[in-house]
């Protein structure tokens, strides 16, 4: 099969590698779409993925082969990958009390979705509901990240919410917050195309931080109090401090985006308001199931995030990653391994 193999020093090579065969209790999935995640882009940019790694964890496909003893799946079943942990086991990243994502988050022994086929244990896939197409299914993972962020937050029905950054995760946070009962959702985003997408995906108002003071504007939009909850989904140098400055007294900032370089904060500006800073990371199985349910019900819609230019063939993956490591107007890019 063909796969995009990371060879180090910001280089992806499309190579022929062995097509996996399922063993006992395993299935093989023929990948249809694999969305490019910002986490993989950071692994590429900062060269933290091990050479030989096949990345890509936001994918959808169909079961193409089942191993001995597998009764849960049949060939042709539509699935997404990377969902639940082994039955009865805690999520593996939460077992390690000192887990360090940049150092331990990119194991090379697992071949993932930037390939034509993926091998998985039978407990891992999740069935794609009727009414959710393959493109939507491939974006269930980033929606699940947003679902987890909202579930871990202190957001209550009717709360005023701000989302900083309207990339894929920020846009998903808009929809997850809406589905959870946010009263209003305000978005800060410097790129015009992403601001428009935020409005189409449920934001009540968008702010351009390049042309106005985003803290002052968010406070004004919330009657002088500040948002009840701020989801920081940008990881730009000023955005964490902006979030802590704009949130209301005793409000909460939920750190969703991963900053890979130092960011400055000035506690004297906001700590007297006794604000809370919380973090979220990755997903649990219930987040995936909730995300699929939101897609199936129409409460989440990825339509404004993708267009014809979003889809790239496997042979163009190097150029796609190079484009994504610099500021971009692109909302979401999706690799089609068979094109």
Image (cartoon, rainbow, N blue to C red):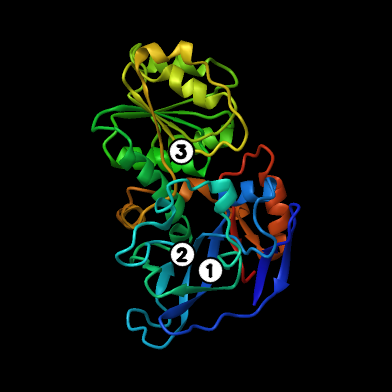
Q: Specify few, some or many for label 3: CA neighbours under 10 Å numbering under 14, 14-19, or 20 or more.
A: many
Q: Is residue 188 above or below residue 113?
A: above
Q: List x then y, in percent, for residue 81.
A: 45, 65
Q: Is residue 125 above or below residue 162?
A: below
Tell me the tag on residue 134: 2
Q: Earlier in the sequence, mark 1 or mark 2?
A: 1
Label 2, secondary structure: give it.
helix
Q: Of 330 and 36, which appears nearest the observer?
A: 36
Residue farthest to the front?
97
Residue farthest to the left?
157
Q: Earlier in the sequence, mark 1 or mark 3?
A: 1
Mark 1 vs 2: CB contact within 8 A? yes
Q: In the rendered image, which residue does mark 3 sit on?
A: 256
Q: In the rendered image, which residue does mark 1 sit on?
A: 32
Q: Is residue 217 above or below residue 125?
A: above
Residue at left 36%, top 54%? 284
Whether residue 98 is visible, yes or no, is yes
Image quarter where the C terminus lies is bottom right
Give the spatial CA distance, label 1 vs label 3: 28 Å
Q: Is residue 31 left or right of residue 276?
A: right
């Amino acid at each position: 099969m063909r796969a995009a193999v990371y060879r180090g020093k910001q280089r992806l090579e499309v190579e022929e590698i062995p097509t996996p065969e399922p063993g006992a209790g395993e299935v093989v999935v023929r990948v249809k779409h694999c969305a490019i995640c910002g986490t993989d882009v950071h692994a590429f940019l900062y060269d933290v993925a091990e050479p030989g790694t096949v990345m890509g964890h936001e994918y959808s496909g169909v079961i193409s082969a089942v191993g001995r003893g597998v009764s849960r799946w049949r060939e042709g079943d539509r699935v997404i990958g990377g969902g639940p942990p082994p039955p009865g086991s805690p999520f593996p990243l939460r077992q390690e009390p000192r887990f360090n994502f940049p150092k331990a988050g990119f194991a090379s022994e697992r071949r993932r979705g930037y390939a034509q086929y993926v091998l998985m244990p039978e407990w891992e896939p999740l069935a794609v509901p009727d009414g959710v197409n393959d493109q939507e299914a491939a974006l269930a993972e980033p929606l699940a990240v947003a679902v987890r962020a909202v579930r871990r937050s202190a957001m209550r029905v009717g709360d005023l919410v701000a989302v900083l950054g309207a990339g894929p995760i920020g846009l998903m946070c808009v929809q997850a917050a809406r589905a959870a009962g946010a009263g209003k959702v305000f978005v800060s985003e410097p790129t015009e195309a992403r601001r428009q997408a935020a409005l189409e995906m449920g934001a009540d108002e968008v702010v351009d931080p390049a042309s106005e003071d985003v803290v002052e504007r968010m406070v004004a939009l919330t009657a002088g109090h500040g948002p009840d909850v701020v989801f920081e989904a940008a990881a730009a140098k000023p955005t964490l401090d902006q979030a802590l400055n704009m949130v209301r007294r005793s409000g909460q900032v939920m750190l969703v985006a991963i900053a890979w370089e130092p960011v400055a904060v000035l506690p004297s500006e906001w700590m007297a308001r006794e604000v809370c800073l919380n973090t979220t990371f990755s997903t649990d199985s219930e987040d995936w199931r909730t995300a699929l349910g939101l897609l199936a019900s129409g409460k989440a819609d990825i339509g404004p995030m993708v267009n014809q230019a979003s889809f790239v063939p496997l042979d163009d993956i190097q150029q796609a990653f190079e484009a994504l490591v610099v500021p971009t107007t692109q909302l979401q890019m999706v690799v089609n391994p068979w094109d």
